[in-house]
Amino acid sequence: MSCRYYKILLLILCLLPFYAPALAEEKKIAVIKEINDSLKTNIIGTSENTPPYVKIIRSKAGLEYLINDFKRIRNYIVFDKVTALERELSKINFNDLMLIAILTQPMDNYTLNVKGVFKNETEKKLEIRIDYSHIRRNYDIPPRKSIYYHMLVIKKNDLPIFLKATNLQNRKALASNPSIFVTGRLLFWKYQDLQLVPLKIQRKKSKIYYIKGKQALQLEKYVGKVVTLKGKVSRENDSPYELDLEVEKVVEAK
């Protein structure tokens, strides 16, 4: 063997230890059990797209803390669900196993998809990979929001755990959003925005519409007048009786 080839072979042998970890850097961890569902809260409204968060539970005490958080949602449907969930999770042997709880804030129309749990051999950590998305909808009466969860039971370890969440494209619902006609008195609100207040307030029926930004400036000349506006609801607030309006046309002003 020539001296040149000997040097090349020696160089390859020297570099092998650096390449070997890269080949075995990552390994998918076996998930022993999965539980996923949602808990309907008493919060009414729609939400912006928000990533989930993770809680790591390695003991019975940690599980009790999680369940007590759920029990603070006071309605009968949730009570039955939480009782069943508590019964199922109490079977976990925390001497050998641990629980990963992926949770959301109260949301509507939310999708949570777990891709897997991966162990990074080089950095000595676990990484949970998920996809999530939220579909924005327009409602006459917004629904109650839900806490979405996905529980994973894996073998117990003391490695740090990180959540890698990928936000799938935030989609607007394909459901039609027809134009509406609303009549009321146009008044100043705050931050130079306007509000359209019904002429007659009826409890649990009347709605207030908010006109914001550039459109509010264009409609300032109608403040104090009774107007009929044509437009579309652009966003629901936490109250089903307060809506943001995207104005298409001033039909009448007097």
Image: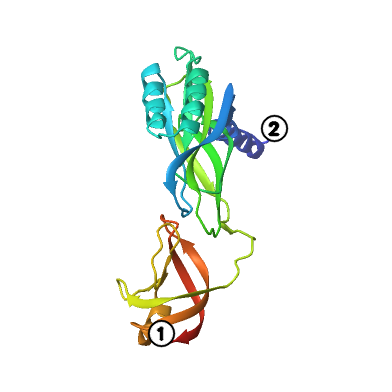
Neighbour tally class for label 1: few under 14, some 14-19, many 20 plus, Cα within 10 Å: few
Question: Can you tell which quarter of the image residue 170 is in?
Answer: bottom right
Q: Amino acid at mark 2?
A: Met
Relative depth, front residue between 123 and 82: 82
* Mark drawn on residue 42: none
**Residue 196 seen in the current view:** yes
Question: Can you tell which quarter of the image residue 20 is in?
Answer: top right
- Give the quadrant of the N terminus: top right
Residue found 37% across the figure and 78% down from its top = 186
* Mark drawn on residue 1: 2
Q: Secondary structure at mark 1?
A: helix
* Residue 229 percent across, percent down from the top left: 49, 79
**Residue 14 seen in the current view:** no
Neighbour tally class for label 2: few under 14, some 14-19, many 20 plus, Cα within 10 Å: few
Asked whether, in this view, residue 236 is left or right of residue 178, the answer is: left
* Mark drawn on residue 218: 1
* Residue 71 percent across, percent down from the top left: 40, 29
Count of marks overlaid on the render: 2
* Residue 38 percent across, percent down from the top left: 53, 36
Residue found 50% across the figure and 18% down from its top = 87
Residue found 45% across the figure and 60% down from its top = 205
- Give the quadrant of the C terminus: bottom left
